[in-house]
Amino acid sequence: MDFSIIADSFGLYIQGLKTTLQLVFISLAIGLSMAVPLAVFRTSKNRLISGPVRAYVYFFRGTPLLVQMFIIYYGLGQFEIVRTSFLWVFLKEAYVCALLAFTLNTAAYTTEIIRGGIAGTPIGEIEAAKSVGMSRGLMFRRIILPGAFRRALPAYSNEVIFMLHGSSLASVITIIDITGAARIVNSRYYSPYEAFLTAAVFYMAITFTLVWLFKKLEHRWYAHLRPQEHSAAAAA
């Protein structure tokens, strides 16, 4: 293994790391903000409200992320109405197209994750909220959504990891992320082992950091479910 190749290309990997983190966390932030209201609409009994959300979720969960990115990056430019609109200023950029594809994809998955959390709300909590006169909106803000977020956290942590790994597809449309940096290094030195092994180490480091952060968050959010060791010791 030639470590000099890695050392010479380290700056390029750092550039790719910054791009990867930007794409992943911006898309996750926007996707989560979209997913919360969409999940609420998804649970509606009115099909005019839940139907469009259901169709959106099924489309983006039922098709590969790479295909979605190709549709946005290559497909939208075929329409004259898109090329002549103000949106073309943004959609002609590969970075924006990748960000849009990632956002719509993760929003669909997160919508279904939060919907599952909402559906798992104990009926007793809902009845108790109704008994004290809470409106539906107040019930969602104080009872249903906080509980749904706690129940959805393990599944959402997996979605964040999947989004990180899926972001490697951005290199296919000329974006220099971590994988894009590895492809450039490979083309320069014809050393796929060094190039892609280094990329793998970067992805693993980010993944383990995210896992650690979510474990800390779960430890804090589920504190009320842990045995009260100090209380038990005091009682003894």
Image (tube, rainbow, N blue to C red):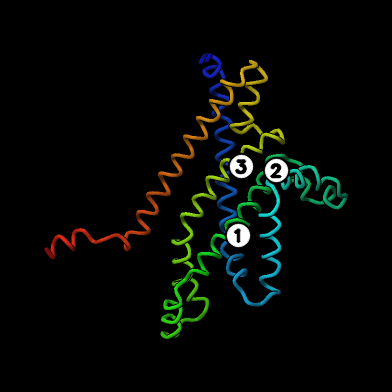
Residue 27: x percent and y percent? 60, 49
Report, in whole angstroms, how far the alpha carbon at label 1 lies from the one at label 3: 19 Å
Residue 33: x percent and y percent? 57, 58
| Residue 165 higher or lower than 86, as above or below | above
Residue 24: x percent and y percent? 57, 44
- Residue at position x 61%, y 33% in the image: 177
Q: Assign a secondary structure to mark 1.
A: helix
Total count of labels? 3
Q: Residue furthest right?
A: 80
Q: Assign a secondary structure to mark 3.
A: helix
- Residue at position x 51%, y 31% in the image: 202
Q: What residue type is labelled 1?
A: Met
Which residue is labeled 2 in the image?
66
Q: Do the residues labelled 2 and 3 touch (CB within 8 Å)?
A: no
From the viewer's perspective, tell me whether residue 168 is left or right of residue 157.
Answer: right
From the viewer's perspective, tell me whether residue 95 is left or right of residue 160.
Answer: right
Q: What crowding class fits label 3: few (fewer than 14 Cα within 10 Å), some (14-19), or many (20 or more)?
A: some
Which residue is labeled 1 in the image?
34
Q: Which residue lies furthest to the left in this view?
A: 236
